[in-house]
Image: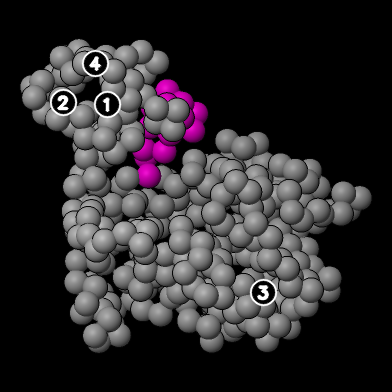
């Protein structure tokens, strides 16, 4: 944030307008495996270029810009990974996140911002009628395949917030399960819990594979279809709603939460995982800015505040609403009792 006492400067304007250049640089670096090729050593542009089989000029300019941004360190003519790059951008790291690019830069997401003014003027998406909320949208298969590694800390953190009865069999409903990591985290912590994952049928093929790899296939089943209309069955002890409600308007969220309330046993709980800004809607910025993603990619979605979730859940029949941070992630858990 600019210092209010400093003289006016166009620097922020230029940085924002040219932000696409940073996107292009990190995309190129991941596609060329720059971070993996450097690894634990430090390497010159010539060495990296030879490994990539690319002309040295392009590699040098790219690496210099990655160093300026903060993705690489540079000493004399040698480049090295920063601690963040070593963890998240080296393919040899178990926390590698480079696989997110196919989803985050999917035209269904990035293209939504090509004519944001038109979306704002008309109140309708310029890309398609329903955006990413369209039934069976293929982008969610990409999301399930690509975004799992990023969700691991959030899933583990969420699973620590709700304790299930260890003395009896319990049932967990995982709404919009996608990669399934939220439900899987709960199932692994609760050996007597049975997990029911709901999503579009093509997406559930990814969920099933992850459940098998997690060793919970014998306690796992699925429901394929539209979460607003498909039979949810019932008698659940816990309903997980991760990163789902932000796609819809308040009325639809309440309508959906009433369905969840009816599917829970008395005393059962709902756990919503979301980007939850403060009521001022601008803090914290890394959370509140998610509303812009919803503006560009959904007809009526938003990043809802703590008080809005409290009102929606109360209207749907829930009680004892609490909002808890999922440290160290930017997301929050909204927990309520049926």
Q: Quadrant of residue 254?
A: bottom right
First reached walking from the N terminus: tag 1 or tag 2 = 1
The residue under label 4 is 76
Q: Within 10 angstroms of label 4, few (less than 14), some, or many (20 or more) residues?
A: few
Residue 37 visible in the picture: no
Whether 85 is drawn above or below 77: the answer is below
Marks 2 and 4, how far apart in space?
16 Å
The residue under label 1 is 34
> What x and y, as percent, mark residue 230?
56, 74
* Mark 3 residue element: helix
> Which is in the foreground here, disc 3 or disc 4?
4
Task: Please identify the residue farthest to the right as the structure is shown.
Answer: 167
Magenta segment boundaries in residue numbering = 86-100
First reached walking from the N terminus: tag 3 or tag 4 = 4
First reached walking from the N terminus: tag 1 or tag 3 = 1
> What x and y, as percent, mark residue 130?
33, 76
* Mark 1 residue element: helix
Instruction: Report the predominant secondary structure element of the magenta stretch.
Output: loop
- Dot label at residue 59: 2
Residue found 63% across the figure and 48% down from its top: 327
Q: Is residue 14 left or right of residue 335?
A: left
> What x and y, as percent, mark residue 323?
68, 66
- Colour basis: one colour
């Amino acid at each position: 944030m600019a210092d209010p006492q400093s003289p006016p400067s166009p620097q922020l304007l230029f940085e924002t307008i040219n932000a696409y250049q940073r996107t292009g640089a990190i995309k190129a670096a991941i596609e060329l495996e720059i971070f993996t090729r450097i690894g634990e050593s430090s390497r010159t542009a010539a060495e990296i270029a030879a490994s990539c089989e690319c002309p040295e000029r392009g590699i040098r300019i790219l690496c210099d810009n990655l160093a300026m941004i903060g993705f690489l360190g540079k000493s004399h003519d040698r480049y090295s990974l920063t601690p963040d790059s070593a963890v998240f951008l080296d393919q040899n790291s178990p926390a590698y996140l480079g696989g997110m690019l196919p989803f985050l830069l999917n035209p269904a997401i990035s293209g939504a911002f090509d004519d944001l003014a038109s979306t704002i003027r008309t109140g309708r998406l310029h890309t398609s009628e329903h955006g990413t909320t369209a039934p069976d949208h293929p982008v969610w298969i990409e999301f399930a395949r690509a975004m799992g590694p990023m969700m691991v800390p959030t899933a583990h953190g969420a699973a620590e917030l709700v304790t299930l009865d260890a003395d009896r069999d319990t049932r967990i409903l995982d709404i919009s399960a996608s990669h399934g990591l939220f439900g899987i985290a709960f199932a692994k912590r609760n050996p007597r819990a049975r997990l029911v994952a709901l999503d579009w049928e093509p997406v559930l093929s990814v969920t099933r594979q992850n459940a098998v790899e997690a060793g919970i296939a014998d306690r796992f089943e699925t429901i394929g279809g539209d979460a607003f209309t498909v039979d949810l069955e019932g008698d659940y002890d816990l309903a997980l709603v991760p990163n789902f409600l932000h796609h819809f308007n308040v009325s639809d969220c309440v309508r959906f939460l009433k369905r969840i309330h009816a599917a829970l046993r008395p005393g059962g709980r709902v756990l919503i995982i979301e980007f939850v800004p403060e009521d001022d809607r601008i803090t914290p910025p890394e959370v509140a800015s998610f509303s812009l993603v919803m503006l560009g990619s959904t007809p009526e979605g938003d990043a809802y505040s703590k008080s809005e979730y409290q009102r929606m859940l109360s209207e749907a029949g829930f009680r004892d609403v609490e909002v808890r941070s999922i440290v160290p992630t930017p997301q929050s858990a909204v927990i309520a009792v049926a």
